[in-house]
Image (cartoon, helix red, strand yellow):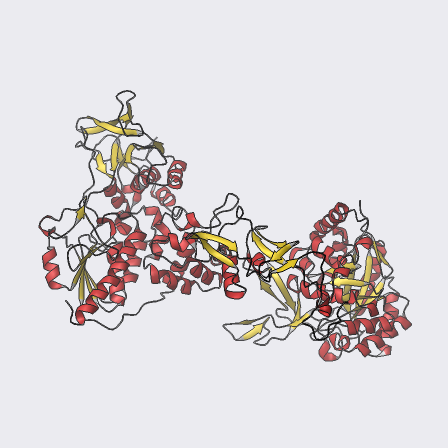
Amino acid sequence: MPELKTTFAGIESPNPFWLASAPPTDKAYNVNRAFEAGWGGVVWKTLGEDGPPIVNVNGPRYAALHGKDRSVIGFNNIELITDRPLQINLEEIAQVKKDWPDRGLVVSLMVPCTEEAWKAVLTRVEDTGADGVELNFGCPHGMSERGMGAAVGQVPEYVEMVTAWCKDFSELPVIVKLTPNVTSIRQPARAAQRGGADAVSLINTISSVMSVDLDTFSVVPTIDRNGTHGGYCGPAVKPIALHMVSDIARDPDCAGLPISAIGGISNWSDAAEFILLGAGNVQVCTAAMTHGFKIIDDMIDGLTRYLDARQIESVDQAIGKAVPSLTDWQYLNLNYTAKAQIDQDLCIQCGRCHIACEDASHQAISATRNGSRHYEIIEKECVGCNLCVTVCPVENCLTLRILDNEVDQRTNQMIRKDDKLNWTAHPNNPMAEPGK
Amino acid sequence: MDIIATATNGVPGIASGRLPEEDCRRNFCEMHSPLEPNSARVEAERCYFCFDAPCTQACPTEIDIPGFIRMIGNHNPVGAAGLILQENIMGGTCARACPVETLCEHTCVRNQPDDRPVSIGLLQRYAVDEAMDQNASFFIRGALSEKSVAVVGAGPAGLACAHRLAVLGHSVCIYEHRPKSGGLNEYGLAAYKMLDNFAQKEAEFITSIGGIEIEHGKLLGRDFHLRDIEDRHDAVFLSAGLGSTKTLGIPGEEVSGVEDAVDFISQIRQADQLSSLALGKRIVVIGGGMTAIDIAVQTRLLGAEDVTIVYRRGPQQMKASIEEQEFAKIRGVVIRYWGQPACIQHQDGRVTGVEFSPTDRDLHADGAGHFTIEADTVFRAIGQAPQLLNDDAEGFNLEGGRFVVDEERRTSRAGVWAGGDCIADGEDLTVSAVQDGKLAAISIDQFLSKSKAGEP
């Protein structure tokens, strides 16, 4: 069977599934339950500096974007870092690590941007026996207004500076958690690497306003008629996270920097996608918050079967396998020609493909034949855009066919698979370098 | 085992109270639970919003079904009801009584072996009920025309026609011989389909637009003649339904205990106490349409022990769909196919059973193989015949006693339109009757507008 055991930034865990720093990892009670359920590691909910504990709102702190079936598509929170005393957290961390020596236990940290503050907290964390620290440079609400969290993560110079302090003051592996609320994720990632980070983790939550109550004219979640922006996560953010993770994975300046992927990972296949795009392990939060810790069973089983079926012997071997497929638009093969095709035996004649193509694309699907309901591709109009495939409700009914040794009816050009041409050499590109 | 049954008028086998009232009420509660808001939205999400949707094409009133389903999904059930009622003012009854399995839901593209159609009927019901609960109003009368239209019969066709005419600004007088409005919605549909006095609520909703006057207790040919209302009004819409039920034409039919199904169905609908209805223990129903199913199922639900429908052809030919036949069988009704009644057996002037002769595909009754089913009551459910117009029949083109109409529901007599069960080629459905009324009203409006402009 494939090996799920991973060593991430020097931290060993029996599987690549960690719980992200969040409410499910706020105290020993939850973390013990998570480890009993089988999670490979946890990032303990962010600790702040010693002193009066953080205060949270006492009204609603979560809100969701629901599907029609009440499934949680997106999730948002306005909760701050841990509101429990530092000493209690540290004592619990020490005990949990003692009780679960084979699991990864990383402590998330967020303290003011001064050397003393970081030094003080790191020393105490090291004493717990925890496996590493994660620097919370990502939280977009509440703490960022106090100069912490995303306020640090959005300035690469700060990221580098604080990372370097942590590496100076501590022997522990340092994972830098990045905020997605930036223009380019590569800048803070490179800064973390320059500062000596052992790894980065991403994405933290995205700044968001969840919704507006149409009756009270207040934003949701509502605290006494007011609301505030929160952090958005859950399945809806997965494509954004995939982009950012892979953008770092393929950045030559970040070569060799391990990535812990976070963002809408709900099951084994989500996890596999992130691993294939360069993640060394994954962190989960929303799925555990909506379904409980037991989802780990399916994650472990599903990933094991996936790797086994493809004769991939370990998680390590899977890391980054899809990264080479990711390129810039200008390198896409413009001679690659697809046409939609409809399997008439599977077609249930709903006509969704027709109306989508008719109103929004290239008028390439006819709706009738001999006066009766029948949907067919008009190849001389079809640009292979995939819209019809996307809207078709029947799996495998509408698919794309790739042309080879065939004339494209739309352009009258002979298409051969081996004739490749990208934008850099395209005749329409004034900057083209012919022959390249 | 009818311990609680009490004999009625000393007639053997006939008794009321075969089941306690609360059991009757429980039996007559809805066959399909209405959708709750969230389940409605989840069901709405199943709709593929087809292009040129087959369900809309299958609906006799051409309701924009994907359109209203989309509105339900988007938390706008009242808007959905508006879209429904715009095409079908009896959307509430149709959602309860339409044979959706042979109409809209039959054509749903999700009607696949590994799938099921969208529950269009339940969604429509959810939207219309929600709107009626909120007392939403959707129609305002147009500018008054000073034209007046007579409508004969306050059933689905008549009410639909009157409503559309009122919307278009005309005044309407409906002549109805029964004490209540609604026609077969009130007197003919099975009680478990129309709980909570829905037909009356709907009739009130329809007439609340104003400009519609209903004169009850007025029967065409008895209390007034066609000529009278032609004189008083600018146009006439005939929607009086059908009259007497057909007879079997077999020996013994005149004895006590041989009854018309429609009469008893009407009694069930009008009963305050279901358990007070007197009925037989062994019941034979003759016929193959919805009326046969309705009387058979309802007598079972009232506590009759043996209920048998005998139909002269096979299940495929039966006018009641396969689903409706299943519905009855699940409720303990026996359906025997390929048999036609030969004679009523009786004793002391009361029915004791029916003798049937087997039939073949060409309905040839074979002499051999006769069978007899014992019965305390025999219900005829073999259809109704048109009312004879007598001296009012002049100028009408009739087919089997029913009016022949054109696409706009015009009869051959100038100034007279017709719709519902009284026209030839009618479909015997509430929804078709509503469409007749709607189309006739549009045609009448065009006719009246022209006459206003000085044309004949």
Q: Is residue B388 left or right of residue B106?
A: left
A233 vs A131, nearest the viewer: A233
B138 vs A128, nearest the viewer: B138
Q: Is residue A18 visible?
A: no
B116 vs B335: above or below: below
Give the residue at the far left of this rendering. B391
Whole-percent x and y of residue A325? 74, 60
Q: Residue at x 78, y 56 (%)?
A: A321
Q: Quadrant of residue A56?
A: bottom right
Screen quadrant of the C terminus of chain A: bottom right
B373 vs A4, nearest the viewer: A4
Q: Is residue A136 left or right of residue B65?
A: right
Q: Residue at x 27, y 65 (%)?
A: B208
Whole-percent x and y of residue A411? 60, 62
Screen quadrant of the N terminus of chain A: top right
Q: Residue at x 40, y 38 (%)?
A: B326
Q: Is residue A170 left or right of residue B95?
A: right
Whole-percent x and y of residue B5? 30, 35
Q: Is residue B149 visible?
A: yes
